[in-house]
Amino acid sequence: MKIDYKTLRKINPEAARMAVLEYLKTKGGKVADCACVFGIQRPVVYNIIKKEKEGDLTDRSKAPKTCPFQTAAAVEDKVLEVKNKTHLGPKRLSIYLAKYENLTVAYGTIRHILRRNKNRITYKVKGRRKQEKREFVDWYSARPFEIVQMDIKFIRDHKALTANQIIHLDRWEVPNYQWDAIDVNSRFKLIAYSREKTWTNGLMFYLWVISYLRSHGVSCQIVFTVDHGEEFGGKSWFKVTELRKLISGFGCRLIQNHKGHPEENAHLERSHRTDDDEFYIPRVFKIRGERDLLDEALAYNYYYNNVREHSSLGYKTPYQHLREQVPGIDEDIRFTIPIMLDEASVKLGPWSGYYVLAQNLNSN
């Protein structure tokens, strides 16, 4: 009969060793037979006998008995003393010790010391701010313009354009960034451009989209879904909080997507591929400067919203679908005119003190 010692040991190490010892007692102490029955090596059996003589059948610690390169106890005590006094992180603590205590300790070593001695740190260590759980966004039951996805596209995309096309854009100093807002219900799209990817231009884009929709009969509450780009508020809780207060006055809300999840803005991300295939790739050599870009974008945006049939809409255009959903919508909404955000942002003024250029126009 065979006994699987390894399986038995996973369940209870002490019981497994007791079974080996009981077998040895009943079989006259024959180590070779015992090893064969339990499927183990003889040194394992001898080790179990030794543990019985020591009076301890539990597992031994796997920690090394000696640590010749371990930091001296006096140095660890000093590191912990200074840590509790200054509350500095490992790198700044290493600099502090070298400067004021004449003690050289690498910050990597300090990090290990602090991890080993968490119970000796006397002050409460602040943890990371818990990220807010993203509110559920129901795309499929949303009415027109109740959910609007916003994002920014880098025009000089090496995966889409050839090297010659990118050189052409550089030669004519065409702006870098395309700003997009798309309605998930109708796929109706608004486009703007900028030379810089800044928070102020992002704020201008929010206000432009809101004012355009409100001026053309869109009265529902608008929910904007955006990524964590700094141009849309990013990681700054203050910017996001202030922005939410500002747009709430226009009947709008803001939801930030999870980091690294572009699928939460899927409709807009897919439209960027259409922009490359049907606009930039075939038309890029026609663009010779900022004015040409705006003219070409005007024609393309009209084509996208009013001519191009979308399979997701049952082969209707966004404007046709929009008219069916909201018969009273202003007909002029279809003539969206792209703008340059940089020029409009200067005229926005020093909202919350973020735009330095707007505050210093008189000094230029």
Image (cartoon, rainbow, N blue to C red):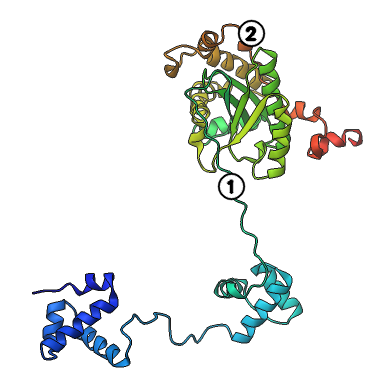
Secondary element at image label 1: loop
Question: Residue flagged by tag 2: what amino acid is it?
Answer: Asp
The quarter in which the N terminus is drawn is bottom left
Image quarter for residue 59? bottom left
The residue sitting at the right extreme is 362
Left or right: 160 in relation to 247: left
Identify the residue shown where x is 20% and y is 80%.
19
Label 1 belongs to which residue?
Answer: 131
Residue 54 at what x, y percent from top left?
Answer: 32, 92
The CA span between labels 2 and 1 is 40 Å
Residue 105 at what x, y percent from top left?
Answer: 64, 78
Look at the picture and state if 171 lies above or below 44.
Answer: above
Identify the residue shown where x is 39% and y is 81%.
61
Residue 117 at what x, y percent from top left?
Answer: 58, 75
Left or right: 220 in relation to 68: right
The dot on residue 89 is none
Residue 361 at what x, y percent from top left?
Answer: 87, 33
Question: Residue flagged by tag 1: what amino acid is it?
Answer: Gln
Identify the residue shown where x is 42% and y is 14%.
314
The residue mark sitting in front, 2 or 1, is: 1
In depth, the one of 37 and 364 nearer the eye is 37
